[in-house]
Image (tube, coloured by chain):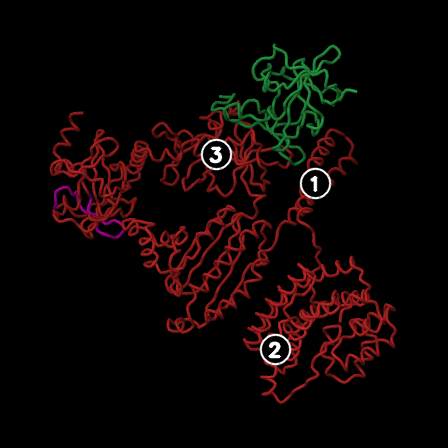
Chain colours: A red, B green
Amino acid sequence: MHIENAIGCDDVLMDEIVKDFLIESNENLDRLDQELVKLESSPSSKELLASVFRTIHTIKGSCGFLGFARLEKLAHAGENLLSRLRDGQLTLTSEITSGLLAMVDAVRHMLTAIQASGQDGPDDYAALIQHFADLQSQQSAASTQSSPAGEGPAGSPKDAGAGARPLGGAELGELADPTKIGGVLVARGQVAPEALAEALRMQEMGRKRVGEILIERGAAHPEDVLAAQKSIESRNPDAVIETVRVGVNLLDRLMNLVGELVLARNQLLQFSSMRQDAGFQAVSQRMNLIATELQEEVMKTRMQPIGNVWDKFPRTVRDLGLSFGKDVHLEMEGQDTELDRTIIEAIKDPLTHLVRNSIDHGIEQPAVRQASDKSAAGTLKLRAFHEGGQVNIEVSDDGAGLNIERIRQKALERGLISAQHASRMSDREIFNLIFLPGFSTADKVTNVSGRGVGMDVVKTNVEKIGGTVDIQSTAGKGTTVRIKIPLTLAIIPALMVAAGGERFAIPQVSLLELVRMDAGEVGKGIEMVHGSPVYRLRGRLLPLVYLNRELQIRRPASADAESSAANIVVVQADGHEFGLVVDEITDTEEIVVKPLGQQLKGITAYSGATIMGDGRVALILDILGLAQRAQVVSARDSALAEKEQQKACAKTEIASGNQTLLVVQCGGQGRMAIPLSLVARLEEFPVSAVEMTGAQEVMQYRGDIMPLLRLSRVINGETSSSPSHTDDRLQVVVYSEAGRSVGLVVDRIVDIVSEKLIVQSPAGRRGILGSSVIQKRVTDLLDVPTVVRNVLPGFADAVSAT
Amino acid sequence: MASTQQFCTFLLDGHVFGTPVPKVQEVIQHQEMTRVPLAPDVVSGLINLRGQIVSAIDLRRRLGLQDRPAGQLPMNVVVRTNDGAVSLLVDEIGDVIEVEEETLESPPETLQGFAREVVSGVYKLSGRLLLALDIDRIVDLSDLNKPKATGNFS
């Protein structure tokens, strides 16, 4: 029944109503998806069933008024099915759920069509409606109770099943019941009681609803009926918290206006502090508080709970589980965790991808799971929580876990890593290989836990918004992917520091820790290595960058480099750590990132600017840019600096009695230790770099010819090449003396340890100082100078000659 | 009847400069500025213009005039550019003057160097000369061959 005609084609009003209907229905459909999936796992829940029923009922009711006949018919069929379920005449099966979900999709299509063309599309989904009828009859045949009149619900959810019951009490009841559509209309005087009674009687006979009948008979205005229905729905105790739709542009404008207000507030405060007027001061203080609060609230309007993205996952998980024949249970934790609107948008796709991956490749088939003592149903867990100013999102499954060997093999096949490199990688490094572009492109690996179709896209997308991805996995136990993202792109937590009288913000993402040295400690705490200042932080040498020197600003006159306390902000950039020395560390603050003008874009030291609480501008430091300016990053490659660092380390070792040793493996399982102070560099060379001069293996190294010593041959007297020698890379420990270098070829670099050295057994072999227990394993201590002199007599001559 | 154009005028070291009124967003009094270390020295700093961060360019330095006497606070002429608002620091704000196109003359020979490049023309006023500035050319600092490696303070 097209009631458009009855309304008299008030197009503007109609457009508005259709628009509202579309928005409302789309929201309802999203809720339906979730509720249906929930319902499937707890089919006996009357509450859920009632809610699902109500949702479909509302859609059906609205489109009835708006004249979308096909849509109404479909919704009606679904409603019928549901009313049977509710009355216990049908039991919910997975088939029915799928059917209902298919209906939700169909309705969604129709809504899209309505939005585009104003019509509910050409498809009437007859097959689906027939399918519903079949579903009903299948079970009805088995059930003794059959009630053909169990349809035709009336205007409100509560009496929706009333059609099946004899009239009389119900009819009288609705006349006065303000929760039912008839009652509301009568109470508002929009419908005569007699007309309603008549309509209710007609409802019993036909399939139409009270409201429709009233409109058709001209007993009520369509607008009144719609309004009455709305008012009933709004009284529904289950209705969601009231919301208003506001355009994003408006929110952004509000944000800017609040910025202006804050500035005006600051000026007002300044003004009031100059006056001795107590009344004026009280008012401006109040103004101050309100403005601050307003600012916070407006910021919040941009935040959305991550649940908004997750809400569609129950459906995704169910559908994927079904199509793969896997039983997957979805758990969600921390749906309320809030993120900036733009970030929510950006992580939608990566998250969906991870969820799909977990079900496709992670969780095994039920039979496989049971064979390995797991419950048949796999669990997929989504977790979100705040940590350190960032949001962590975890997608974990209790599936088969990643297959390390397979990943390694695959990476080798694809030429992403070399064989030598592969053998030295930690499990975690190997897991992270799946994020490499091109890791899995050619053949699709399904049913193998080596996942990674498009994982590089996940990583790129997350990194685009300043986030990181990490993957952890235990074979047979499952896999967890953890995404860390900033709360918002526009507002970031930052540490405020001062240098040379100016304030700067350091984004918290780059921050590792803060170290404060009192005036007395500065002199001995900071050492010079190869002309650059370093600080010894828990045994490591941390290169230092003085912010005021780097930015060429003067320290405040009072401060003197040597006498005052030093504040070191330990930061990291691109995997390198360094200490940024500042005059003062003030506070952490949430800052709003603003871009710099074109005039200042070329300066790599800043990533933007922000406005502080007092209205003044502060620059945001770009840690990576600073590191490059200060050449901290490349400084690490300076062999000399490294060697001096090691010498400096050796000094402390003597004092503490500990020694730092490089543990290497050579000649099968033999472990050998070399004092780190004797190691100039650790290098890796391709085998092809090795050349011969006479019988001596040599290679070109830093403009010199460096002889190579195969340690396994020298010490163990092995003559045949061990397998690693045919490998593509050589591990070389470079030893230098008086400007001359020798490369000691080892099979593998095991570790660097700092231990108190107790030589337990005297040496039996040449070139070995003795043996000691290091890391609970017997390790030979190599006497490097002796070994070198024995094997290369010429080296000693050359050294003594210089 | 001759066509006329309105000019917003300002004073720099005794000279009258001007720019067409539509180019000017607003004129505000001296604002506190945040210095930008490593920036070219014509950039005096950043100001907070109602929540928007705006670079302030010292016109005296930009035009190669001598620095403003210490203690004299400059005014901000905020101009519209393709890259958003930019503030130009001037000594004093003058009137809005209506000039006749006919009185436009090419820049005098005495103007030297960069100033000659950015002065698009000269209008003869009664007893004075109005130097019209090419704002887009002024805010484009690419002629300063990038930020200076050594700043003013080292």
Q: Distance between the Cα atoms at labels 3 and 1?
A: 37 Å
Which residue occupies the foreground of this view, A220 or B106?
A: B106
Q: Secondary structure at mark 3?
A: strand
Please, what is the three-letter code of the amino acid marked with disc 3? Asn
- Residue position for label 1: A257
Q: Secondary structure at mark 1?
A: helix
**Marks 3 and 1: same chain?**
yes
Quadrant the N terminus of chain B occupies: top right
Q: Secondary structure at mark 2?
A: helix
* Location of residue B137 in the rendering, given as x and y in whole percent from the top left corner: 59, 24
Q: Give the mark nearest the N terminus, 1 or 2.
A: 2
- Residue position for label 2: A132
Residue at image position (13%, 29%) is A797
Residue at image position (33%, 56%) is A410
Q: Give the mark nearest the N terminus, 3 or 2.
A: 2
- Bin the neighbour count of mark 3 within 10 Å (Cα to Cα): few under 14, some 14-19, many 20 and up: many
- Residue position for label 3: A567
Q: Distance between the Cα atoms at labels 1 and 2?
A: 55 Å
Q: Is residue A79 left or right of residue A790?
A: right
Q: Determine whether label 3 and label 1 are within 8 Å by CB.
A: no
**A779 drawn magenta:** yes
Residue at image position (13%, 32%) is A794
Q: Give the mark nearest the N terminus, 3 or 1.
A: 1
Please, what is the three-letter code of the amino acid marked with disc 1? Leu
Which residue occupies the foreground of this view, B98 or B41?
A: B98
Q: Which residues are magenta?
A: A764-781
* Location of residue A328 in the rendering, given as x and y in whole percent from the top left corner: 48, 68
